[in-house]
Amino acid sequence: MIKKLITRLLGKPGPKQRRTGRAHTPRVVGVEEHKIDPALISRNAVKVTSTLQQAGYQAYIVGGAVRDLLLGIKPKDFDVATNATPEQVQALFRRSRIIGRRFQIVHVTFYGGREQEIIEVSTFRALVDAVASETLPEGRRLKRAELDSKTHAIDASGRVLRDNVWGSQAEDAERRDFTINAMYYDPAAQTVHDYHHGMEDIRARTLRMIGDPVTRYREDPVRMLRVVRFAAKTSFGIDEETRAPIAELAPLIHNVPSARLFDEMLKLLMSGHAWASLQELRKAGLHKGLLPLLDVAIEQPMGQRFVQLALDNTDRRVQAGKPVSPGFLFASLLWHHVLQRWTKLRDEGEHPIAALNTAMDMVLEKQTGQLAIQRRFVTDMRDIWGMQPRFEKRVGRMPYRLLESPRFRAGYDFLQLRCEAGEQPAEVGQWWTDFQNAHPDEREALIESARPARGKSGKGARGGSGDSHDGGHDGGQDGGAEGAEDGTGHDGDAPARKRRRRRGPRKSDKVSSRSEAQSTDGADGGQPEPGPRRAQPEE
């Protein structure tokens, strides 16, 4: 600190200060140097910038979109920065709305066919010193209405709570987190405005924080997760001064609202480089006690192979442009946590299905208490987990009922991951692959092939509730047929044996599921409904 003060008084800024000091004049890079391909730019983003410029405002494509364009990658999202206020932006676009409390931005929506594109427009932010901003005392919580009345406020740890003070482009560039994200592209002039040597860092493939890293992490602890995600996504190295404070400041992540933390974690896991991101978290010292789901993913020794297979599969789908289900991803991360508790409860003598329900409730209650996992994702997770024991019942009507479940595909993909990881025999996964692709006549043969061998007593092997009652049903049917040939018993003296009636599934065979609570299409159990039964494939 003293060395920095002396250097500032003497007026001899060093090379590192040159990077982090205030830059009021940008370096303008022409098309011959940046070589950005206009074909990679969204037409809607260009429409937003041109509309703002025609109205007399400054407007640039900014942030990660410029970084990706310089790397030759087509950006997924486009952000625009302007000197127009949110109200002025909203007045120019019919389909737009102002969102955000901590920092107000405008979402401009464009519709094209079945898909829509949202361009996020933000106003240049001003530099506000800590002395000028209002600092809330430690332990004090303001109501939302009180915070909304303030333009800039921070808490005792330095985290910014409100940041709605507008400034110039130079100030906005200094407020951004990394040098490679602080460049502005003008589509009309095809020029890049670089304030903090971002072009040099892109060539050197280095992630560097603008300003003092400790202060910037205190302002927004989520930046510690962002630096990890960007490093994994771009394969850039992290500058040592940027990396050093992360391990010490990691506990500040608990001050972030759980909903925002969940959104950032979702971006990290669905970035197309999920496994690499987890490894970067370990290097940065963020994996211990930071996020419960990530702790499970990294620290579970018996589930590490399963989690890596799930994340690799997710990365391949993201890179191929295919949709990814967050519920499936979270179910994979937490499965071995559920499996561990499920096994323990079964060993204590609890019924397998009831034990699974209890294990799911225990794990979800713990995780959702710390992370705001949306209810629809929780429902998907319960459905996927609840299907797993039902895949082991491959007799009678069970396979047909499971095949009709709306969540069958997700549960089947989850089963294939378990087979690939060695948790389940590969034969089980192959049987279900053959069953769903087989002709209705061939499915009965597959069910017969999965039926356990019958012993001398004529009863089915004790392989589960479905197997045992089917074996009894077959034995009763054979005995009734023999007695019915002459109306007598086996030796002509005993009365004919009655044909045994097949019992209905027990209540304990049903795994509770919120999405199936009012529907019996995907349930393998439950009491039979009165009235005519739905037609089933012919046995």
Image: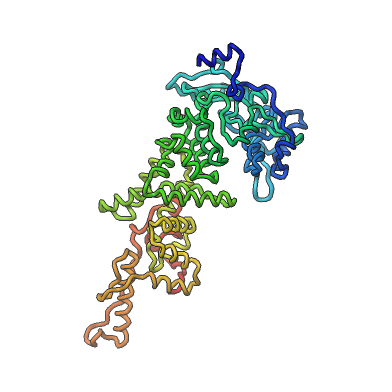
Residue sitting at x 51%, y 14%? 2
Left or right of residue 80, residue 229 in this image: left
Residue 129: give x, y in percent of width and height: 57, 18
In this picture, is 292 found above or below 474? Answer: above
Q: Quadrant of residue 81?
A: top right
Q: How many marks?
A: 0
Residue in front for this viewpoint, 155 or 322: 322
Inspect this view and state whether residue 331 appears: no
* Nearest to the observer: residue 162 or residue 339: 339
Q: Position of residue 384 (x, y in %)?
A: 44, 53
Pick the quarter of the image with the C terminus.
Answer: bottom left
Closest to the observer: 494 or 272?
272
Residue under the point 52% across and 41% down: 268
Q: Residue furthest right?
A: 54
Residue that appears at 29% across and 86% down: 487
Q: How is the image coloured?
A: rainbow
> Picture coordinates of residue 145 (x, y %)?
53, 25
Query: Quick check: 490 above or below 366?
Result: below
